[in-house]
Image (cartoon, rainbow, N blue to C red):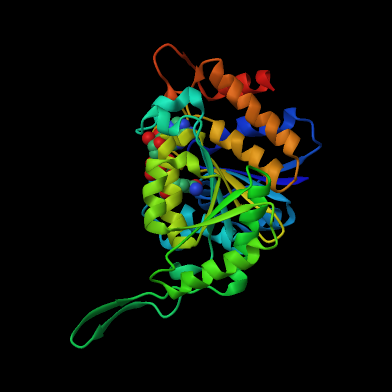
Amino acid sequence: MKICVLPGDGIGPEIVAEAVRVLGALDLGVEMEEALLGGCAVDATGNPYPEATQKLAQAADAVLLGAVGGPKWDKNVREQRPESGLLGIRKQLGLFANLRPAILYPELANASTLKPEVVAGLDILIVRELTGDIYFGQPRGIEMRNGERFGLNTMHYTESEIRRILRVAFEAARKRNRKLCSVDKMNVLECTQLWRDVAIETGREYPDVELSHMLVDNAAMQLVKNPKQFDVVVTGNMFGDILSDEASMLTGSIGMLPSASLDANNKGLYEPSHGSAPDIAGKGVANPLATILSVAMMLRYTFANEAAAGRIEAAVKKVLAQGFRTGDIFEPGMKKVGTREMGDAVLAAL
Ligand code: NAD
């Protein structure tokens, strides 16, 4: 098990350090090697995704990333911006499947802006296609037609692109409650009629998973009305962009949410859903739990070690039940801790 560790910028090094301690404590014989990505890489080499990092990331089975970016690099030219490094690594590793769980631990139900009874115990997984759809389709652009400006984008998917993301979602559903909801807009868009047809065909390979379909407008509504009806949701790039942000905000606690981006062989890049939080960087107060939970996803999806993934998740639940809280999820009456102490608490719970 070779893991390329990319702490990145801002709070990245602080939260990744805790995740690495947790991974080490499991004693799984993993090899970890660190490299530079993002602003720190620009400072050291002039390139946000330097060659040494590319070599390490390509040779590794999985990548653990903190976060990249910060005001220091905001005015750089595009090729020297931290985000270019992130797009570069995603593209080079062929990561087409983005998995974002939205989990609300009962202890944190008050962090959500929704009523606790609607969201307490929420546990859904949004699977978003990352490399196709209207975001990449040609032709595109803004041109003059009939004396006025005309904007154009093209939505397209091949059936093989749809099938491969559907398979990732079905496999993920098999590891959970075996319910998959495929989201499309087949009443208006032919491209998503194909999506639905291929979803139904692919579903025949997974008779043990209950497949349902929902139009995207209804899905947006159902996510806030009754989010607990969902187990796994799969959708295209654009709908997934919007629905995964909506789903993560149901929980109200960005410092808690992990994510995975996978290639065709389950090699993956694992990172918290949040950014580099420059406003609290270097203060030792960031919540490391999203990054620690990203390690659990890595063990589940890349290394197929459900037992170890479950141990980490159980440890996180335990520290929340014990009342440990970083500033972002703090409520009166709880024990306020910093990044390192939160890591210590998870290690003790493990
Ligand atoms: P952000 O997620 O970094 O921060 C938003 C707010 O949430 C801030 O108040 C921050 O303090 C807080 N927060 C985030 N993570 C936290 C944690 N673990 N514990 C406690 N509080 C936490 O988003 P932003 O401020 O919009 O972006 C800051 C930088 O991060 C920008 O440069 C942006 O480009 C970058 N960014 C990177 C990624 C990535 O690396 N994948 C993703 C999003 C944003």
Q: Where is residue 295 in the image (x, y as percent from the top left)?
A: 65, 38
- The residue located at (41%, 61%) in the rendering is 77
User: From this viewpoint, is residue 181 visible?
Assistant: yes
Question: Looking at the image, is 161 positioned above or below residue 99?
Answer: below
User: From this viewpoint, is residue 136 visible?
Assistant: no
Return the residue found at the far left: 147
In the rendered image, the quadrant that contains the C terminus is top right
Question: Looking at the image, is 164 positioned above or below residue 27?
Answer: below
Which quadrant of the figure has residue 167?
bottom right
- The residue located at (42%, 41%) in the rendering is 226
Q: Nearer the viewer, residue 44 or 247?
A: 247
- The quadrant of the rendered image in which ligand 1 is seen is top left
Q: Nearer the viewer, residue 349 or 278?
A: 349
* Residue 269 shown left or right of residue 75 in the figure: right
Q: Position of residue 63 (x, y in %)?
A: 65, 48
Q: Where is residue 26 in the image (x, y as percent from the top left)?
A: 75, 30
Q: Position of residue 37 (x, y in %)?
A: 57, 50
Return the residue found at the far right: 29
- The residue located at (26%, 79%) in the rendering is 150
Q: Which of 81 and 103 is in front in this view?
A: 103
Question: Looking at the image, is 13 positioned above or below residue 79?
Answer: above
* Residue 245 shown left or right of residue 309 in the figure: left
